[in-house]
Image (tube, grey):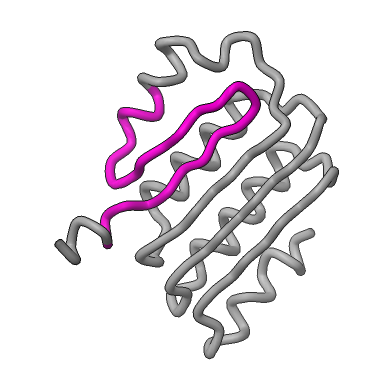
């Protein structure tokens, strides 16, 4: 997992990363390894990261990954998408408040997913 997360750093001509993980059962450690690898990619212009799994991931792990990416990702645009999530507390005020506190992102919550986009470059283009 660590090797996969760090492979993009070596490809300095790479501008766009699209990753879709299905039923990989990632945990907090794996999400942080990916975040560390992504944060080292100063040459990347856009990242799309899709995670599709039925395994229950603690909301704190998802928020930690999203917050780290929102605050420190060097690339101008990203899409983070988590689907097949089953949380009874998903649409609570606490969830919305945590996401609203993050700057330069917009988010969409549905019954079983969350989609987060970095919007700072959209604001700069206007």
Residue at 69% of width from left, 75% of height from top? 7
Q: Which residues are magenta?
A: 98-121
Residue at 52% of width from left, 40% of height from top? 115
Question: Which one is nearer the viewer's eye here, 72 or 120?
Answer: 120
Residue 40's spot in the image, x, y percent? Answer: 51, 68
Question: Which one is nearer the viewer's eye here, 38 or 78?
Answer: 78
Say if the magenta span includes residue 108: yes
Quarter of the image holding residue 48? bottom right
Number of numbered discs: 0
Q: Is residue 20 left or right of residue 25?
A: left
Residue 20's spot in the image, x, y percent? Answer: 71, 56
Say which quadrant the C terminus sits in.
Answer: bottom left
Q: Is residue 123 left or right of residue 54?
A: left
Quarter of the image holding residue 72? bottom left
Against 88, is 83 above or below?
below
Against 113, is 4 above or below?
below
Question: Which one is nearer the viewer's eye here, 108 or 8?
Answer: 108
Say which quadrant the N terminus sits in.
Answer: bottom right
Residue 37's spot in the image, x, y percent? Answer: 60, 63
Q: Is residue 117 left or right of residue 13?
A: left
């Amino acid at each position: 997992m660590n090797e996969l997360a760090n492979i993009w750093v070596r490809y300095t001509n790479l501008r766009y990363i699209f990753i879709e993980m299905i039923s990989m059962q990632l945990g907090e450690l794996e999400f942080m390894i990916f975040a560390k690898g992504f944060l080292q990619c100063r040459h990347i212009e856009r990242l799309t990261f899709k995670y599709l799994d039925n395994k229950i991931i603690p909301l704190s792990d998802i928020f930690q990954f999203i917050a780290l990416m929102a605050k420190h990702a060097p690339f101008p645009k990203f899409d983070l998408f988590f689907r097949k999530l089953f949380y009874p507390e998903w649409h609570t005020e606490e969830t919305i408040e945590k996401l609203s506190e993050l700057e330069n992102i917009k988010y969409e919550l549905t019954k079983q997913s969350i989609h987060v986009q970095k919007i700072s470059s959209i604001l700069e283009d206007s």
